[in-house]
């Protein structure tokens, strides 16, 4: 019987079936960061346990670090304490840390792929829900909690139930001005934020196959926003070309042997899925969220829907969303005034994202009332962007050029919304309070659309700017 | 394993938090994640939601001391932060009954010994209203039988097999269970081409 990538990876990593009926699953790569690990290391110390496979764990600093002045000690004493814990734990347990001195620091989901740590056929875990990102190279990657981080550190395993598998096919092609972010926001809008509960998503179809690796990373990144436990794309020539020459990818003859194995773990033709959903790529236009979860979105030419048009159980959340955002049902999203523009995050903080934002930034200047930030996803992204002169394009247009980190995606450092500020953001969550102000408001969109909004001072259609 | 770890039945007063898609940012805003321990999380459960809404159930005197949380659909979606179930647990929550749950959140609850039970939309709406009407009356959660009793009404409330077995048998604290595999862990790793260096 034809098998899927999920079947093959799951089987290869099964240590045993647990008495509970779950699988004891070996985790091939464990990525850690400063925020969700100090308690796990503390538990490990209390249990007098070592890290089982220290060579399979890698750490970085991303969530709390400042993106303006990174001189230690950090101005925020809590951030400094958290970083100090990370340095101490990595040293105590003899684990490799990519800090600022290495030139390889960055958002954990940006550096894993760019260093070639993330590879096809692996199981990957990280104490961060956006670990689903790594599925873009054909890995099965789970976000986990802190006590599960303890489990992986101590045993290199997780107790997991195998999810069901849904293939999400994106057919035909995308129009100009429509990006990977618009594809995943459309998928979440059509299938819902709870539509993926119980599932892993396999993304397939001509649009996905034609995507670059960075675009696939954007799609897989937001699998969790659709409720899916993980999401992946089958490894193909794009994957192989992407990994060739990466510092932690196999080299020379080993790379050729690796490619044979990588190809062998892809889903076989004729494999069956628990469910298949299809979306026509041509139907997708630039998407903007208008509400308080990533499903609440419309095409930029559309109007904000009415709660009355929703099924009864959804209406209270819709009304709450309109009240929080200060929007009225029937209002066009285009023209909504913004205060802040943010390009960055594990969703859209890669070189290709900065390139497209810079392309738009060349067309004008940031509106006077808008505070605009460009935060590269990693030191390597920043370096590559600077080599191309992108930082100068941004600065000339009035954007701030920052250092790498999670920044305003979740507002754990100084980069926060103030009061009810409205943000056009290339990040992944528009939850109430997400960007650091309890009353702040977030509109999610592609980096190109963020740059367009920054210049217009309001939501604009990037297709009209790029024309 | 000590019987202390078994989570067969949990009985306590209820607290309803209505609404769907309540995310973990709402349960515990990110600024509280800068603490390097979980100790203070209970004080900050739903902090911003409580400030913005004086009527929030977590503010209400009648629900103080409650231990069974009754929620809507997709509760705990979003961030993987274990700080969310830690905050609820340290506030006093011992079991959660809802329409559905974010999967990482539900997994984090199990590993803390907190069962998440799924009931029908109709039963959830009834239970939320009934608990609000009679906050002093105990809710009985039976993980083993997969049912919830309130007064003289019993509703079906399911827990997936794996977590249910872990909770009922007291094996939810998973490190010890995973360690039992011993050398099979290294043996599995040793068969993987990428571990062997291709």
Image (cartoon, coloured by chain):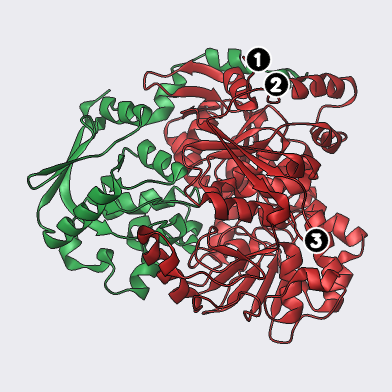
Chain colours: A red, B green
Residue at figure coordinates x 26%, y 39% from the top left: B157
Chain ID for label 3?
Answer: A
Residue at figure coordinates x 90%, y 24% from the top left: A252
Whether residue A76 is visible, yes or no, is: yes
Q: Secondary structure at mark 1?
A: helix
Chain ID for label 1?
Answer: B
| As drawn, A28 above or below A420 | above
Image coordinates of residue A8 in percent, x first then y, are 63, 20
Q: Earlier in the sequence, mark 1 or mark 2?
A: 1
Q: Label 1 crowding class (10 Å Cα cut-off): few <14, some 14-19, many 20+? A: few
Q: Secondary structure at mark 3?
A: helix
Kindly identify which residue carries mark 3: A354
Image coordinates of residue B30 in percent, x first then y, are 50, 60
Kindly identify which residue carries mark 1: B190
Along the viewing direction, whichever of B27 and B177 lies nearer the viewer: B27
Compute the Cα span from label 1 to label 2: 6 Å
Q: Are marks 1 and 2 in contact (CB under 8 Å)?
A: yes
């Amino acid at each position: 019987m034809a098998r899927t990538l999920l079947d093959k990876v799951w089987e290869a990593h099964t240590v045993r079936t647990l008495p509970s009926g779950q699988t004891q699953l070996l985790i091939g790569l464990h990525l850690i960061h400063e925020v969700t690990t100090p308690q796990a290391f503390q538990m490990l110390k209390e249990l007098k346990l070592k890290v089982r496979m220290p060579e399979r764990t890698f750490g970085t600093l991303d969530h709390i670090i400042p993106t303006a002045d990174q001189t230690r000690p950090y101005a925020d004493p809590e951030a400094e304490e958290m970083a100090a814990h990370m340095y101490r734990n990595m040293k105590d347990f003899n684990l490799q840390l990519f800090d600022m001195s290495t030139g390889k620091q960055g958002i954990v989901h940006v550096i894993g792929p760019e260093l070639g740590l993330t590879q096809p056929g692996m199981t990957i875990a990280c104490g961060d829900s956006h670990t689903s990102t790594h599925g873009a190279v054909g890995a099965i990657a789970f976000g986990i909690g802190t006590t599960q981080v303890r489990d992986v550190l101590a045993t290199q395993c997780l107790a997991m139930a195998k999810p069901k598998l849904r293939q999400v096919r994106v057919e035909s092609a995308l129009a100009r001005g429509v990006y990977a972010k618009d594809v995943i926001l459309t998928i979440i809008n059509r299938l819902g934020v709870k539509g993926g509960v119980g599932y892993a998503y396999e993304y397939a179809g001509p649009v996905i196959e034609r995507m670059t690796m960075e675009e696939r990373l954007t799609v897989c990144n937001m699998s969790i926003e659709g409720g899916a436990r993980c999401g992946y794309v089958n490894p193909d020539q794009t994957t192989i070309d992407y990994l060739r020459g990466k510092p932690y990818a196999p080299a020379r003859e080993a790379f050729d042997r690796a490619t044979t194995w990588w190809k062998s773990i892809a889903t076989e033709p004729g494999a069956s899925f628990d469910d298949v959903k299809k979306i026509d790529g041509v139907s997708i236009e630039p998407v903007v969220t208008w509400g308080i979860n990533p499903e609440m979105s419309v095409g930029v030419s559309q109007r904000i829907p009415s709660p009355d048009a929703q099924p009864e159980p959804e209406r209270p959340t819709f009304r709450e969303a309109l009240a929080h955002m200060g929007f009225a049902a029937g209002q066009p999203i285009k023209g909504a005034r913004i205060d802040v523009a943010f390009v960055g995050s594990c969703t859209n903080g890669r070189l290709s994202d900065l390139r497209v934002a810079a392309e738009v930034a060349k067309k004008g200047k940031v509106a006077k009332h808008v505070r605009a930030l460009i935060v590269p996803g990693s030191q390597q992204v920043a370096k590559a962007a600077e080599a191309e002169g992108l930082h100068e394009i941004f600065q000339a247009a009035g954007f701030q050029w920052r250092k790498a980190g999670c920044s305003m995606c979740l507002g754990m450092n100084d980069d926060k919304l103030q009061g009810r500020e409205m943000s056009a953001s290339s990040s992944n969550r528009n939850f109430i309070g997400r960007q650091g102000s309890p009353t702040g408001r977030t509109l999610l969109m592609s980096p190109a659309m963020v740059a367009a909004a920054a210049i217009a001072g309001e939501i604009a259609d990037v297709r009209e700017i790029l024309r | 394993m000590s019987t202390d770890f078994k989570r067969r039945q949990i009985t306590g007063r209820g607290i309803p938090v209505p609404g769907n898609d309540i995310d973990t940012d709402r349960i515990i805003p990110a600024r509280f994640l800068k603490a390097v321990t979980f100790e203070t999380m209970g004080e900050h459960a739903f902090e911003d939601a409580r400030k913005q809404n004086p009527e929030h159930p977590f503010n209400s005197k009648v629900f103080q001391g409650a231990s069974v949380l009754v929620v809507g659909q997709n509760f705990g979606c979003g961030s993987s932060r274990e700080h969310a179930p830690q905050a609820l647990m340290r506030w006093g929550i011992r079991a959660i009954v809802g329409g559905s749950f974010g999967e990482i959140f539900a997994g984090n609850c199990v590993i803390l010994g907190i069962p998440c039970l799924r009931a029908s939309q109709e039963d959830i709406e009834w239970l939320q209203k009934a608990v609000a009407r009679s906050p002093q009356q105990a809710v009985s959660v039976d993980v083993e039988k997969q049912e919830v009793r309130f007064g003289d009404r019993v509703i079906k409330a399911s827990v997936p097999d794996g977590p249910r077995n872990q909770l009922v048998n007291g094996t939810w604290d998973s490190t010890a269970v995973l360690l039992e595999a011993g050398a099979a862990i290294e043996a599995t790793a040793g068969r993987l081409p990428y571990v062997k260096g291709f």
